[in-house]
């Protein structure tokens, strides 16, 4: 489990992020149109998984905006913004913000994505939500880069994530 903080207070996650060089764990998430979206749907494409607790918090919203801005210039790459928010909240946010270059996906049904990626928060006020993390997956489905953000309120290192592509 990872030891991270929320406002300086320690919280834990359900495990560790996948190791670089390993196959990315399979997942099925829910799109904003309520469709099922799986890792296999992106075969042959590089992925940036921008993972966060909730779109309705300042840092989470900022990460979606920043990755949306950068995603338009990335070749053969999709940015997936993943949280446990309902797909309706994700769609509302993206519509209101004009977010068009990222794909919002929800783990609201069973939290299996958070568990298989080891980033479900297990204690504290955000228990059950995802920690803030970034995982970069290459076109062959292998993990190239991970960042478990140590303080949930902090933004991820965008440049390091994009450099891993």
Image (cartoon, rainbow, N blue to C red):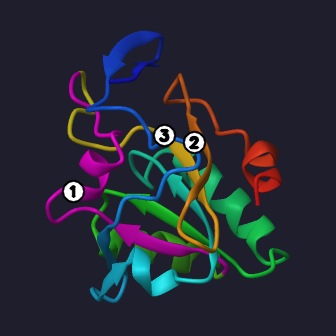
| Residue 161 relative to residue 30: left or right | right
Counting from the top left corner in percent of width and height, residue 37 is at 35, 82
Query: In 3D space, how far apart are the residues under numbered discs 3 and 2 (Cα atoms)?
Result: 10 Å
> Residue 5 lies in what quarter of the image?
top left
Residue 99 can be seen, yes or no: no
Give the CA distance from mark 3 to mark 1.
Answer: 16 Å
Please tell me whether mark 2 sits on a helix, a strand or a loop.
Answer: helix
Q: Main secondary structure of the magenta part?
A: loop
Which is more N-terminal, label 1 or label 3? 1
On whether residue 107 falls in the magenta region, the answer is: yes
| Distance (Cα) linking label 1 and label 2 | 23 Å
Foreground label between 3 and 1: 1
Going 85% across and 76% down the picture, which residue do you hit?
73
Q: Is residue 89 left or right of residue 59?
A: left
The image shows residue 35 at horizontal and vertical percentages of 29, 89
| In front of the other: 97 or 112 | 112
**Residue picked out by circle 1:** 112
Please identify the residue farthest to the top as the structure is shown.
Answer: 9
Q: Which residue in the protein does label 2 denote? A: 59
The part of the image, by quadrant, that contains residue 165 is: bottom right
Instruction: Give the residue number, with chain letter if any, for mark 3.
Output: 132
Q: Which residues are magenta?
A: 101-123
Residue 19 against residue 141 in the figure, above or below: above
User: Could one spot residue 69 in this view of the protein?
Assistant: yes
Q: Secondary structure at mark 1?
A: helix
Percent across and percent down for residue 158 are: 74, 47
């Amino acid at each position: 489990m990872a030891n991270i903080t929320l406002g300086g207070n320690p919280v834990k996650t359900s495990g560790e992020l996948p190791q670089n060089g390993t196959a990315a764990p399979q997942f099925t998430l829910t799109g904003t149109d309520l469709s099922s979206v799986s890792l296999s749907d992106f075969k042959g494409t590089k992925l940036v998984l921008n993972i966060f607790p909730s779109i309705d918090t300042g840092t989470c919203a900022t990460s979606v905006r920043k990755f949306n801005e950068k995603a338009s210039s990335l070749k053969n790459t999709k940015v997936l913004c993943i949280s446990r928010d309902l797909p309706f909240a994700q769609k509302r946010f993206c519509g209101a913000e004009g977010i068009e270059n990222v794909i919002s996906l929800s783990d609201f049904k069973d939290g299996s994505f958070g568990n298989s990626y080891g980033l479900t928060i297990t204690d504290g006020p955000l228990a059950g939500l995802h920690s803030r993390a970034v995982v970069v997956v290459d076109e062959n489905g292998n993990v190239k880069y991970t960042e478990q953000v140590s303080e949930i309120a902090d933004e991820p290192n965008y440049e390091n994530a994009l450099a891993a592509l």
